[in-house]
Image (spheres, grey):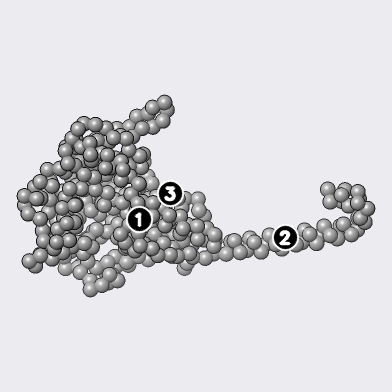
Amino acid sequence: MLFRFAAHCGIPAKRVFCAAVLMAAASILFTGCLTEKDSKETTAEDTHLVLGTVARIQARGTEKAARMAVEEAYDLLSDIDTNPDRTAILEMEAAAGSGEWTKIPAELYEMLFLAQAISRRSDGAFDVTMGTLTTLWSEARTRGEPPTEAEIREARAHVGYQYLELREGNMDGVPIYEGRLMKPGMQIDRGGLIKGYALDEILEHWDGAHLKGALADLGASSMLGIGTNSEGEPWQVGIRNPRGTSSVDMLLVMPLSNEVLSASGDDERYFMYEGKRYHHLIDPRTGYPADTGLASVTVILPLSTDSPAWEGHAGVLSDMLSTAIFVLGPEKGRALLSDFPTALVILIGPDGKVIGSR
């Protein structure tokens, strides 16, 4: 086309040929520069306060891919932090005991469905309906004094995963999800799985981002590691000593690659009263902080699973398992893990020493 245009304008073909060669060379050089810059590997990193903790995100890849991955992760965390499901949860709680169904978002339905599955398997050691107990003990931490037996008994009367009902259907081909709480005064508690859910959401958005590696660290208690670090090795993460003198006192350093990690410990939120430690990991079956000879439980799960029901939900699963095992104790906790043979679990006792792993 260039030669036809030149002939039409009376420009000599030789000059046109030289110009074409120069233009092609310039194009190759320019394209080469863009490709080299775009393909240059870098690690983007940022830290923010979100979900009640200090979150640190690292992503390794091209400059653009790494930067976008970090930004997307924090956008997701900020959205989850605003609790977009709050309206639906409040509507369910307001209708508790009435028998009325409440329409809920698909994401909330899925979260509650998975929570019920672990509640059944753990015989109620994990219970997503323990909102009244969570609120009661949160107020106790603020006062620095445990609630009375009568207050605990009253709160427990509104707990029971068996009384959370879910159903799905469709209207004109559009899926509809609904839930209801069958006992008056029941409340949903997202605290035991929200960080794991956040990791699953981040992983889904990173899929196809062409990253060489990435690490999402939500306060050391919930982590997602994919690929490798800048040395080409698995990400190295610390297992905190629950009886350490500082937050950087680590008992172990573990590799994390294409895996999620969740930890539950009695050192995260607690108060001392008359020489006794009252922590936030409440046994829904008793209403009191779990006392099973454990100070910390860490669960590491691979992102891939043989169970289709848990595919894409490794974060939520690890979060719930760490809580359930802490409440159940070492023996019953190991029995729960028989359903999840690929899980790696680290148990730490009240003296700050590792008492078992699998």
Q: Is residue 142 left or right of residue 35?
A: left
Residue lying farthest to the bottom in this orientation: 245
Q: Position of residue 188 (x, y in %)?
A: 24, 45
Q: Residues within 10 Å of mark 2 (few under 14, many from 20)?
A: few
Secondary structure category for the residue under label 1 = strand
Query: Looking at the image, do the residues carrying marks 1 and 2 touch, with CB atoms under 8 Å apart?
Result: no
Q: Is residue 176 above or below residue 225?
A: above
Q: Residues within 10 Å of mark 3 (few under 14, many from 20)?
A: few
Q: Position of residue 54 (x, y in %)?
A: 34, 63
Q: Quadrant of the C terminus?
A: bottom left
Amino acid at the residue labelled 1: Val
Amino acid at the residue labelled 2: Ile
Disc nearer the start of the sequence (2/3): 2
Q: Mark 3 sits on what residue?
A: 204
Residue lying farthest to the top in this orientation: 172
Identity of the residue drawn at 80% across and 62% down: 22
Instruction: Tell me the CA gap for discs 2 and 3.
Output: 36 Å
Q: Is residue 187 left or right of residue 63?
A: left
Q: Position of residue 36 (x, y in %)?
A: 62, 63
Q: Position of residue 302 (x, y in %)?
A: 36, 53
Instruction: Tell me the CA gap for discs 1 and 2.
Output: 43 Å
Q: Mark 1 sits on what residue?
A: 260
Instruction: Looking at the picture, tell me which residue is in the foreground, 242 or 175.
Output: 175
Instruction: Tell me the CA gap for discs 1 and 3.
Output: 13 Å
Identity of the residue drawn at 16% across and 37% down: 183
Of labels 1 and 2, the one closer to you:
2
Name the disc covering residue 28, or none.
2
Identity of the residue drawn at 86% across and 60% down: 18
Amino acid at the residue labelled 3: Glu
Secondary structure category for the residue under label 2 = helix
